Amino acid sequence: MATSFPSPTDLTICFAHVAYQLESTFARRETGIPYFQVWSRQELAARLPEADVLVVSGFWQNSLLENAPKLRFIQSIGAGVDQFDQAALRARGIRLANASGVNRNAVSEHSLACILALARHLHSGRDNQRQRIWRGMISDLSQREDELGGKTLLIVGLGAIGARLAKLAKAFDMRVIGTKRNPATAQGVADEVHTPDRLLELLPQADFVALTCPLTPETTNLIDARALAAMKPGAYLINMARGRCVYEPALLAALQNGAIAGAAIDHFWDEPLPAESPFWALENLLITPHTAGETRMYEENLMDILLENLERLANGRDDLWNQVV
C-alpha cells in the first residue's frame, strides 16, 4: 500500500505519449515540479521507476505496475480507462483519474461535422474530385444531398459530449432524443431522454445515431446485428465512442448490403486499422483515425485537470476531478 502523496517539490511527473506535446505545455505553467516526457513504450518501461505521477493513455500496460515503486497517481490522457486494472491500482494505493470533458468540444464538433459530411455527401464529393469527375444533377431524391432540419438525431450517452452535441444539433433544427442511465440527471436541450434499455425502440425513429457513450460491459457490442436491423435503411451511424461499442462484422455487413445508408467511424477494434480491412473500400463510410478528440487545445485542457488533481492530492483530499480509483 502506498504512503501519503509527496509534496510538489518532492514528486516527479512522467508524461507518456507518442505525439502530444505534454512536456512543453506543462513547462509553460511554471509549477516548479520536476517532469520529463517519454515517447515510446520502451522509454516508459525504462523510466517509470522515477515517476510519482504518470500522465498516460495508449502506452499503458498493467505489467508496468511491477516496475513502478514510486507511482502514486495516474492521470489518464483520455476519458477511457478500460486499459487500467483498477483492482490492481487500488491494491497498491495508486489513484486514477480520467480526462472526461477534456475533449467535450472537440468530439461533439467532430460528431456534427461527420453528420453534416454524410448528409451533404462530402465524402463522395472528395472521391469524385480525386477522379476528376464532375457529378451531374440527380433526379432520384433518395440519392441527393439532404438537409438536417426536421431530422431526428439519437444520441447514445448524454454525458458532457452528448449534451453538447444535442445543443449543436438543435441549432440545425434537428429533433434530438437520447439515452442516459439516469435521465433525471440529463442536462441540455434534448427533446426526449430515455433509459438505455429502450434503445431498440428508439432506433427506428432516428435518421442519425451518434454513439458518445463510454465502453462498459453494458455498451460492449451495443450496436449489433439486431440494433442495425432496427435502424432506418436511410439512417447513418456515427461512432465517436470506443470501437467495441459496435459489433464490427454486423456493421460491415450492414454497410455492404445497404441495410443502413452509411456510417462515420472514429475508433475501430484494432488500431491502426489494418491495410487489408474491408472497411477501407466502403464508399458509404467515413473513417477518421481516432482523432475526434484532438485539437490544438487538447494539451492545455488536460493540464487544467492534472494541476487541479495534483493540488487536491497534495491537500490530502479524496475527491479527484474525474476520479476513477
Image: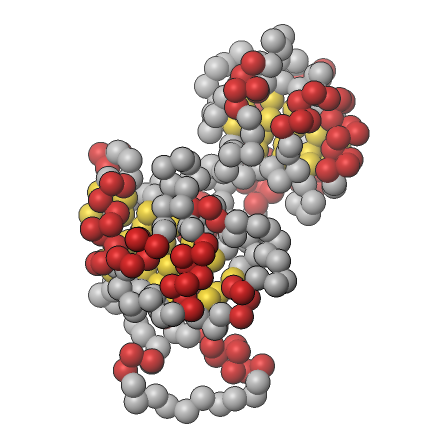
Closest to the observer, 52 or 211: 211
Residue 63: x and y in percent read 67, 27
Residue 213 visible in the displayed image:
no
Closest to the observer, 14 or 46: 46
Does 230 sit left or right of 116 as displayed?
Answer: left
Number of marks in the image?
0
Residue 188: quarter of image = top left
Closest to the observer, 263 or 47: 263
Q: Please say if 207 is above or below 146.
A: above
In which quadrant of the rendered image does the N terminus lie? top right
Residue 78 visible in the displayed image:
yes
Q: Please say if 184 is above or below 269.
A: above
Residue 314: x and y in percent read 58, 15
Residue 10: quarter of image = top right
Identify which residue is drawn at 62% across, 40% down.
Answer: 58
Residue 202: x and y in percent read 22, 52
Residue 289: quarter of image = bottom right
Identify which residue is drawn at 53% across, 11% down.
Answer: 316
Does 200 sit left or right of 6 as displayed?
Answer: left
Residue 81: x and y in percent read 52, 33
Identify which residue is drawn at 20% across, 51% down.
Answer: 201
